[in-house]
Image (cartoon, rainbow, N blue to C red):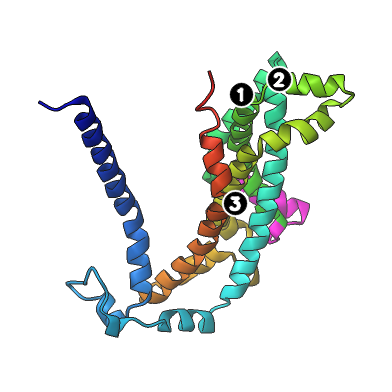
Amino acid sequence: MMTGEAESRLASTLRLFLAGLLTVLLLFPIYWMAQTSILPTSSILSRNPDLLPRLADINLSAFEALVRQYPVARWFLNSAVITVGSAVLSTFCATLAGYSLSRFKSRTASGIAFVLLLGRVLPGTLLVLPYFVLFRWAGILDTHTAVILANASMIIPFATFMMKNYFDDVPRELDEAAKVDGCSAMTALWFVVLPIAKPGIAATVAFAATASWVDLLFARTLLLSAENWTVPVGIASLIGEVQTSWNQLMAAGVLSVLPVFAVYWFAQPYLIGGMTSGAVKG
């Protein structure tokens, strides 16, 4: 018969095993993409591909050919501009909206929250055509501004509720104490609430940046000129009707995920802090 300590150790071992198994399953597609990018075409199209690549087959020719044949640097620059613009605009709007919904309770606020939820439910495919007509009428079609506004419209509803949840965890007494000391609502938000809500802001920035970086629908529809293409649009153009260079396609995929890893790597301390912020509440 197992003792309580033995049962606890067995449960801990099972949790670690399941966590390791889940990690392997989630990371395997990324591993296979990276492996395909460094192998020659003959190995990629083999009927019995090796799980581990042979050292003699490894080379970076796909990366060299990709950079030499396609304007990869321009794709990354366009994606960076759109991602930064979308993340800044979405985080700014979501922070103010989330703070308002958290602190000011009224029927109007409830109605605004319902409209935001409704906007989140609408799919991008339903909005892209009206956006195309609207931006052409406004004269900003085929510009980064059009994609930034379209991305922000899809990100802000969800990001607003992310920020609202973080603001709900900040005690209202801090706002009231700041107001007693002479702060307005905005200065109390800036000097008192936002420093405490840094994990929420980091999570919102990471979410907005990732959603903008991987966007294909709006970028493919609203950017008509090849010089304005983003990374997802450029990668999609590598898929030919007759033939596709799979190692170059996977090389582009590897390069495209590196900025996402960097964002989450630097935001990791804030994200972990945000996830555990409510764990010690009494």
Q: Mark 3 — residue?
A: 209
Q: Is residue 117 above or below residue 126?
A: above
Residue positioned 71% across, 28% down in the render: 99
Which of discs 2 and 3 lies nearer the camera? The answer is: 2
- Locate residue 108, reporting x and y percent: 72, 18
Which of discs 2 and 1 lies nearer the camera? The answer is: 2
Which region of the structure is painted magenta? 126-144
Residues at badges 3 and 1 in contact (C-beta under 8 Å)? no
Q: Secondary structure at mark 1?
A: helix
User: Which of 189 and 177 lies nearest the eye of the viewer?
Assistant: 177
Q: Secondary structure at mark 2?
A: helix
Q: Secondary structure at mark 3?
A: helix
CA distance separating discs 2 and 3? 30 Å
Residue positioned 64% across, 68% down in the render: 77
Q: How many marks?
A: 3
Q: Mark 2 — residue?
A: 172
Q: Mark 1 — residue?
A: 114
- Locate residue 60, reporting x and y percent: 41, 81
